[in-house]
Image: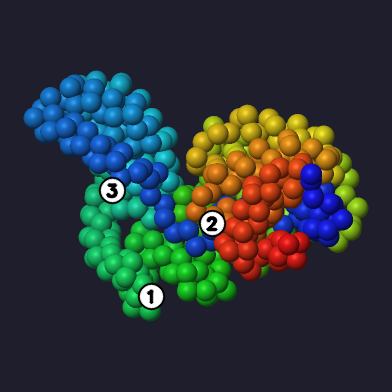
């Protein structure tokens, strides 16, 4: 016989099920203001070793003058590792060396498009400019060097592009060579600062970064130093100072490179800092500006961040019992839907935007649309990379089914979460959703009259593994 609902079940109804239970689910804002890396997409160690081996084999063919064979190898690498921008650049280089200039120009463009924020993007553009000269198209070469300088003023390749432009026009390269020599000195100090930062010697690193900025104020390294200074200030919880640094960086680039990669990154950091300080309106304005970026990755990130803030604002209004129209909810979901259509949006970004669509129906108190959207989501996403988003949707759907007195249908959703996180680590920031899942599974099993050992084991897990959770307290009081 199922336990009576007069005890634990009724006593905790306010904590789970229905609409109030979802208020603890934080909105899906994934950008960390302390995320400092701008490198290439990571791979696991086995894949990285395999990629390194394949590139070494292709490099050997190229060094032996077997350019067509090397190009074929690099193309094969790209088929297996489509985000390997280096392979894209080397493919084009070997095609160029083999005399296939049209193929090389096409593949330099393709390599550049893989990751416009990566180091190899600057290499792809510079190599393409030289290839354009080889093809006799000076105007294309100059257009490419102009793009390089506008998008990457913080790269040494911007100065190399300046020298190439002087050569194309038949002008003196003396000034460009002077700037390159100066950059070499500035870059050496910058790398020393980077090494200190990596060793968490932040004060010493900041001293070096200031040295770059004062001794070589107009160098690409000075821009990189300013950006790193802002990151260190964030990491050391000096966010007011970091905000000033990033704002100054954006202002410095406003006339010469307003849409550059480094300017977009600085604006993204400013928006994240505003958001962290509850300046949501200012953050939203900046993200909306970045949504129009010519860089697809920047636009995709800004879109998902803007959607998250729109969702937060609606959540805040609902908590404060302010009137919200259906049109406002629809507009927020439309912002999320746009993320799903962006080719550059990552799987995680798409899943995050789609999760907000599902959860919005919970806040809007539209149970059937929640179930419909949740079912669609769970059919669309299965990858390990978005496991935490999948878990939240399982929780939302399970809770609604439980509220409808369908515990037998809710149980598989709760079991999915329990099995997906065997280490019992919380799967969503600033919450106790995993403990709550164990608790809801405990309730559902009790309600449907499952064997006592099943729900008693869950209760013991709650009391031992989640001892400080409110749900563990409820279980103790129920026994």
What residue appears at the point 79 percent right and 46 percent down from the top-left corner?
A: 2
- Quote the CA–CA distance across marks 3 and 1: 31 Å
The percent position of residue 6, horizontal first and vertical second, equals 87, 56
- Disc 1 to disc 2, how far (Cα)? 31 Å
Residue at x-position 50% and y-position 41% = 385
Q: In the structure shown, which secondary structural element does the residue marked by tag 2 occupy?
A: loop
Out of 463 and 116, give the one closest to the viewer. 463
Who comes first in sequence, dot 1 or dot 2? Answer: 1
Label disc, if present, on residue 160 of the rendered structure: 3
**Element under label 3?**
helix
In the image: residue 256, left or right of residue 5? left
Q: Where on the picture, by quarter, is residue 269?
A: bottom right
Q: Position of residue 217 (x, y in %)?
A: 37, 68
Q: Nearer the viewer, mark 3 or mark 1?
A: 1
Q: Is residue 271 visible?
A: no
Q: Is residue 34 left or right of residue 22?
A: left
Element on which disc 1 rests = helix
Tag nearer the camera, 1 or 2: 2
In this view of the protein, which residue sits in the foreground, 265 or 150? 265
Disc 3 crowd, CA 10 A, few/some/many (<14, 14-19, 20+): some
Question: 99 or 8, which lies in front?
Answer: 8
Quadrant of the image for the C terminus?
bottom right
Q: Which residue is mark 2?
A: 425
Please, is residue 191 above or below residue 99 in the view? below
Q: Which residue is mark 1?
A: 202
Q: Which percent across, then down, holds residue 287?
A: 63, 51
Q: Earlier in the sequence, mark 3 or mark 2?
A: 3
């Amino acid at each position: 016989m199922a336990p009576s609902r007069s005890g634990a079940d009724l006593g905790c109804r306010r904590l789970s099920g229905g609409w109030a239970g979802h208020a603890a689910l934080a909105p899906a804002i994934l950008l960390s203001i302390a995320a400092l890396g701008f490198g290439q997409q990571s791979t696991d160690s086995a894949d990285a070793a395999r990629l390194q081996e394949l590139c070494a084999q292709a490099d050997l063919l190229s060094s032996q003058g077997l350019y067509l064979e090397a190009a074929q190898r690099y193309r094969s690498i790209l088929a297996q590792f489509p985000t390997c921008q280096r392979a894209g650049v080397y493919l084009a280089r070997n095609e160029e060396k083999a005399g296939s200039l049209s193929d090389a120009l096409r593949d330099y463009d393709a390599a550049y498009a893989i990751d416009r924020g990566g180091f190899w993007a600057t290499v792809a553009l510079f190599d393409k400019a030289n290839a354009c000269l080889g093809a006799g198209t000076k105007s294309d070469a100059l257009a490419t060097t102009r793009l390089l300088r506008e998008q990457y003023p913080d790269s040494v390749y911007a100065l190399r592009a300046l020298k190439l432009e002087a050569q194309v026009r038949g002008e003196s390269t003396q000034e460009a060579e002077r700037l390159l020599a100066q950059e070499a000195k500035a870059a050496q100090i910058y790398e020393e600062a980077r090494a200190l930062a990596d060793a968490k010697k932040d004060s010493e690193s900041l001293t070096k970064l200031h040295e770059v900025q004062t001794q070589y104020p107009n160098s690409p390294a000075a821009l990189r130093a300013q950006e790193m200074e802002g990151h260190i200030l964030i990491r050391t919880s000096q966010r007011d100072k970091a905000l000033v640094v990033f704002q100054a960086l954006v202002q410095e680039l406003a006339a010469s490179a307003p849409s550059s990669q480094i300017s977009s990154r600085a604006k993204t950091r400013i928006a994240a800092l505003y958001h962290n300080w509850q300046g949501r309106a200012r953050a939203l304005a900046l993200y909306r500006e970045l949504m129009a970026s010519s860089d697809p990755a920047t636009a995709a990130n800004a879109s998902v961040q803007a959607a998250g803030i729109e969702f937060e604002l609606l959540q805040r209004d609902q908590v404060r019992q302010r009137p919200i129209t259906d049109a406002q909810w629809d507009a927020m979901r439309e912002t999320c839907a746009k993320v799903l259509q962006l080719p550059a949006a990552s799987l995680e970004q798409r899943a995050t935007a789609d999760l907000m669509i599902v959860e919005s129906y919970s806040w809007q108190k539209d149970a059937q649309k929640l179930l419909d959207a949740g079912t669609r989501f769970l059919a669309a996403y299965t990858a390990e990379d978005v496991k935490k988003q999948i878990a939240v949707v399982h929780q939302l759907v399970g809770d609604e089914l439980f509220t409808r007195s369908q515990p037998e249908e809710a149980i598989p959703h709760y079991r999915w979460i329990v099995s997906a996180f065997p280490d019992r680590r919380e799967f969503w920031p600033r919450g106790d959703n995993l403990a709550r899942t164990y608790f809801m599974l405990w309730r559902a099993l009790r309600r449907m009259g499952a064997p006592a050992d099943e729900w008693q084991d869950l209760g013991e897990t709650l009391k031992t593994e989640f001892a400080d959770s409110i749900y563990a307290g409820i279980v103790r009081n129920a026994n």
